[in-house]
Every structure is written in C-alpha cells, then in structure tokens.
C-alpha cells in the first residue's frame, strides 16, 4: 500500500465534513510526538520555529529558506500532512511563488500566507499592519497558479490579519476572506477573531472552510462548540513549544540547585528517565 | 564589543572550580541555559539527531548540520559553546574541516572521539593524528579554541585505566587541551587519570564523577535538557489529544506565575519594540501599537 501524498491527505481533511486539530511543531521531535499522540495533521508554527531556531520572537526574522529547510526535515519524518506557516510569503508576489514552489517540493500538505506588511509579526501581538486587499489577492492568485502547475492537491490557506491589525475590523477581515476565496484559497484563516459571534458570521459568509486558532485575543472554545459553529481546522500552534520552554526553565533552575547529586556522582533529581528513543527513527548501530 | 567566547572559556577554566555544562539543542534551549548563568554549554550530535532529524543515529548528522546549529546558538547567546565533533566526520583531513567550521561558527571548543562508529576504538596513532590535525587548525585560526580529545572506550574488557591513561597521554602530546574520558569506573580511576594526565578532564555527570574529583574542569550534564523538554512536550501532546481545550486552559493556568507565563514577553517582544523605537521612523512605531489588537510589548 503506497502512502497517501501529503497534499492529498491535507486536501481530504479540509474537504471532509468534520473538524480536525493540527497541533504546532517546531522541529522533527515535536512533529513526531504530535503524530504519535494520534493527531491527523500537524502545523509548522512560524512563532515556535523563530524562537527555537533563532532564539528570536516572531517578527519576520525567519527567512524563506530557513522555513523550507525545517519543513523538509519535518515532512521527511512524519506520515501525517504538514500545514506550513509561510508568514507573508517572504516578500512580494515573486517571493510568494518561490515559497509555494519550495514548500510543495519539501513535501508539505499545504501552507498559509497572511496579508500583513512584511516584516510580519505574531498574529496576537499588537502592531500588525495590512497590505491592501488587491496586493493580498495577487499573492493568493500567485500561490494558486504555482499550486496548479506543481500539485493540484496542495492546500492554499489564506490568513487574514484584518481583524486585529492597524485600521482593521471584523468587516475588513470578512471582506478579505471573501476576496482571498475568490482568488483561489482553499481555506481561510481569519486570525484574531474576538467572539463566538464573529466566528459564526465568518463561517456563514465564507464559501470555503475556516481555520481557527484558540489563543491570545480569540476565545478558548471546545471542539464541539467550534464544530457546531462550522469551523473545520483548529490550530494549537505553540502548545508543545510552551511546554518545552517551561520544562527547560525548570531544568535550568533545578540543575543549578542540585549540588547534592553532583557531589554524589549521580544524575540527580534534574535527570529524567523519559524514553526519548521511542519517538526516534532507529539508527543502524551507530 | 562582544568578548571572544574562546578567551572567555579559557578564563573560566583557569578559575578554581568545576564548570557545570548543560546541553543545548537549539537557540531557545541555549538562551534559557544562558539565562540560568551557566559558564559553558554543549551541543551534542545526539541532541541534533533527535531534535532536528528525529533519529537515534547520531552518525547521520552531517558536519554542516552541526555547524549550522552551533552557529544559531552562538548567535543567540554569549555563553561559550562546546560542540561535539563526533568522530571528526571522517579522517584527519575531515576533522580539520570540522575544526575550521566550528571555529567559524563561533564555538569555543570541540570534543572529538576516538571510536570507529561501531564501538571499537581506532588505533591510538590514528586518533592522535586526528587530534594533531585539529590542533594545527586551532593554532592557525584561533589558538584559544579548545580541542578536547574524547576517549570513547574500547568496548568489552579491554579498557583499563592504564589503556585510558596511555591514550590520554598520546592525545595531550598531540596538543589536546582537555581530555574527556567516557566510562571511567569510579573515583579511583578518575583520580588516577587526573594524576597521570597533564590536562584537565571533562567528565559526564552521573557516571561516577563526583564533583570534587581530581583534575575535573568541566562536568557535562549530557542531554538532560533535551530529555526534560521532550518529556514535557509528550505530556502536553498526550493531554491535549485527550482533553483538548480543557487541558490547554489548565496548562495556561499552571504557568501563570511561571517565568514563561507571559510567553510573548519571555521570547523577547519588548526588546524588539525598544529596537523599533530606536531605529524605525517614529510614525511607524507609535500608531501601530495604539491602534491594533493583541499583546502590547
């Protein structure tokens, strides 16, 4: 039995009349763990990649090639489709086209491109600015064109930051969602909706499925509620990343205090017998 | 101007204390370890294999991947970094390129093992030649860069403290700055190595290395940071898979008082805003924060 192509698998999930969750990952280990936990898809978080790879916040410092490189590592190592956060497409329309080309060839199931001014920033941090609708439409059209040439199943998700950005509003977000749908987006990610009413109105007014991210300014709704509202895809972009960060801070504090174990020649309380190996592909005796 | 990390580590090694060395595996873990005030950190092939590639086979990690990861870490922190050079990525000539790339990546030193990839030690002359080759690169590019010779053990019963001392002496004669014996059993062997070898030791925590050990300069904590991070991610993903948003809300509640509770602040958005205020046009900064939604750095 041959494995389903990632883009085909992602397209089926987006088309299917059932909600699904894509937890975020930032490296292969977090991706393999999400797959092992039973999720049907995974998101590669721009925020978490920026912090884990660069040690810098999500303000558009990550390059396209860094995103593609990490994407390739992850797609090579998991059997579930990956939705890649491609920020603004890393520039103008030409950059968007190159980004889509590279992300498809890296083996992803889909990507999303947002309508922020480049350099972008995290969707739940103030200070976002928008490109014009026309420019956003041109980017989605360009992405759609490349997808049609290389892999028709590849999922193009248009993210609009119209709700929370400077000069934005719910209506702005709605107008953009419709325009990006007409431009060829398969699914819309209206970032930063602030109420149940907005989610419902967005689903009702948009002809393609909606992705939702429960964080920051957006309500923390249960899956059943989101499904009832008509949401198709749910992100948890930085969950595992946050857990990792917390654990690392605790580790650093514990180890600094753990003199007794050092004196005794033991691994000490800061050690763990966690079996990391079961999430790794085996080595050949190396 | 930023201080040279190789000089800084040499200064710290001259202090009368054992340097505790946690292992980083990406820039984020490095930043957290640096914030913890540790004097030195390491980057192992295993941690890059596990986190970046998702494999247990450390021999699959390329020199390029190690150097790139090292470069991300040294760009993010001002704590000296020791890089695991594996077996030198080939023969003495490949080992030279490894030394060169790690120096260029901003590392403060590297440790290279003397095994053949299958658990057997390579002949001591060959291993000493690889060390000498790296020492040559060190002397050309940065005399303060540390070349650490790792004794990976000879397997089975053949390894005795005498064979370890013999090898260590050969590596010191080849110019190694420190000796990193893997698997000495107990205080007596460590003490004997410390007495017999004219270079300070790097030892692994938890393998019998008591802190006041004779001649110990650096105590490595291996990949425990990665293990802790991985365990926490697994707990989270399992809990999230089972309970969805209820788990997320409980998690967020637990971290409210934690240093990472305000994640945007923790990862450095306020520092970016300060830089924006300093270097961007004024109208670019003020208006955008006051008239948009979300966390305000």
Image (cartoon, coloured by chain):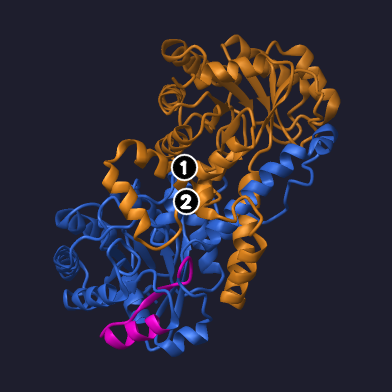
Chain colours: A blue, B orange
**Image position of A284 with respect to B78: above or below:** below
Q: Nearer the viewer, residue B142 or B165?
A: B142
Could you say which quadrant of the image residue A141 lies in? bottom left
A237 left or right of A209? Answer: right
Rendering coords of residue B283 (x, y %): 27, 47
Chain letter belonging to callout 2: B
Q: Residues within 10 Å of mark 1 (few under 14, many from 20)?
A: many
Numbered-mark total: 2
Q: Residues within 10 Å of mark 2 (few under 14, many from 20)?
A: many
B187 left or right of B80? Answer: right
Rendering coords of residue A100 (x, y %): 23, 60
* Residue at 63% in and 43% down: B223
A88 left or right of B116? Answer: left
Q: Which residues are magenta?
A: A197-217
Residue carrying label 1: B61
**Image position of B206 with respect to A42: above or below:** above
Camera sees residue A68: no
Q: Nearer the viewer, residue A139 or A268?
A: A139
Residue carrying label 2: B53
Q: Residues at badges 1 and 2 in contact (C-beta under 8 Å)?
A: yes
Q: Of label 1 and label 2, which has the lower sequence position? A: 2
């Amino acid at each position: 039995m041959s494995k389903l192509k990632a883009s085909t698998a992602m397209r089926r999930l987006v088309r299917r009349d059932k909600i699904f969750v894509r937890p975020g990952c930032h490296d292969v280990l977090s991706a393999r763990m999400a797959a092992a936990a039973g999720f049907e898809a995974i998101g590669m978080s721009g925020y978490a990649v920026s912090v884990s790879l660069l040690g810098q916040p999500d303000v558009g410092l990550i390059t396209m090639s860094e995103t593609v490189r990490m994407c390739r590592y992850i797609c090579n190592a998991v059997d579930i489709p990956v939705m890649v956060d491609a920020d603004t497409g890393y520039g103008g329309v030409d950059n968007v086209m190159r980004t889509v080309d590279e992300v498809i060839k890296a083996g992803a199931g889909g990507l999303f491109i947002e309508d922020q001014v480049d350099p972008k920033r995290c969707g739940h941090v103030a200070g976002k600015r928008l490109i014009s609708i026309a420019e956003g439409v041109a980017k989605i059209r360009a992405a759609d064109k490349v997808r049609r040439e290389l892999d028709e199943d590849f999922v193009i998700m248009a993210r609009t930051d119209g709700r929370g950005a400077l000069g934005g509003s719910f209506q702005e977000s709605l107008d953009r969602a419709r325009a990006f749908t007409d431009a060829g987006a398969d699914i819309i990610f209206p970032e930063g909706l602030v109420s149940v009413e907005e989610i419902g109105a967005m689903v009702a007014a948009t002809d393609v499925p909606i992705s939702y991210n429960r964080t920051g300014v957006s309500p923390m709704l249960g899956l059943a509620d989101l499904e009832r509202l008509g949401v198709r895809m749910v992100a948890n972009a930085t969950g595992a990343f946050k857990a990792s960060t917390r654990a690392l801070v605790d580790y650093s504090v514990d180890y600094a205090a753990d003199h007794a174990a050092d004196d005794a020649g033991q691994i000490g309380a800061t050690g763990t017998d966690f079996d990391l190996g079961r999430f790794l592909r085996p080595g050949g005796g190396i | 101007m930023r201080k040279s990390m190789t000089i800084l580590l040499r200064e710290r090694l001259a202090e009368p204390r054992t340097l505790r060395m946690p292992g980083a595996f990406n820039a984020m873990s490095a930043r957290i370890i640096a914030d913890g005030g540790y004097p030195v950190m390491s980057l192992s092939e295993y941690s890059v294999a596990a986190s970046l590639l998702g494999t247990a086979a450390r021999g699959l990690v390329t020199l390029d991947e190690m150097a790139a990861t090292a470069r991300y870490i040294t760009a993010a922190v001002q704590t000296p970094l020791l890089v695991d050079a594996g077996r030198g990525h080939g023969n003495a000539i490949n080992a030279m390129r490894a030394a060169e790339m790690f120096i260029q990546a901003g590392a403060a030193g590297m440790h290279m093992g003397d095994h053949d990839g299958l658990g057997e030690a390579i002949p001591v002359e060959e291993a000493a030649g690889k060390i000498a080759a790296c020492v040559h690169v060190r002397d050309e590019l940065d005399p303060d860069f540390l070349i650490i010779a790792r004794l990976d053990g000879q397997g089975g019963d053949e390894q005795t403290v005498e064979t370890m001392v013999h090898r260590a002496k050969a590596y010191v004669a080849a110019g190694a700055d420190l000796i990193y014996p893997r698997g000495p059993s107990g205080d007596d062997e460590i003490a004997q190595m410390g007495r017999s070898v004219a270079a300070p030791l790097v030892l692994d925590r938890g393998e019998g290395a008591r802190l006041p050990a004779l001649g110990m300069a650096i105590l490595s904590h291996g990949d425990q940071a990665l293990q802790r991070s991985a365990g926490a991610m697994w707990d989270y993903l399992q809990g999230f898979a089972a309970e969805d948003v209820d788990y997320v809300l409980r998690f967020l509640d637990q971290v409210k008082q934690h240093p990472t509770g305000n994640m945007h602040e923790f990862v450095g958005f306020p520092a970016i805003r300060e830089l924006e205020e300093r270097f961007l046009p004024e109208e670019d900064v003020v208006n955008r924060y006051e008239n948009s939604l979300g966390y305000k750095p």
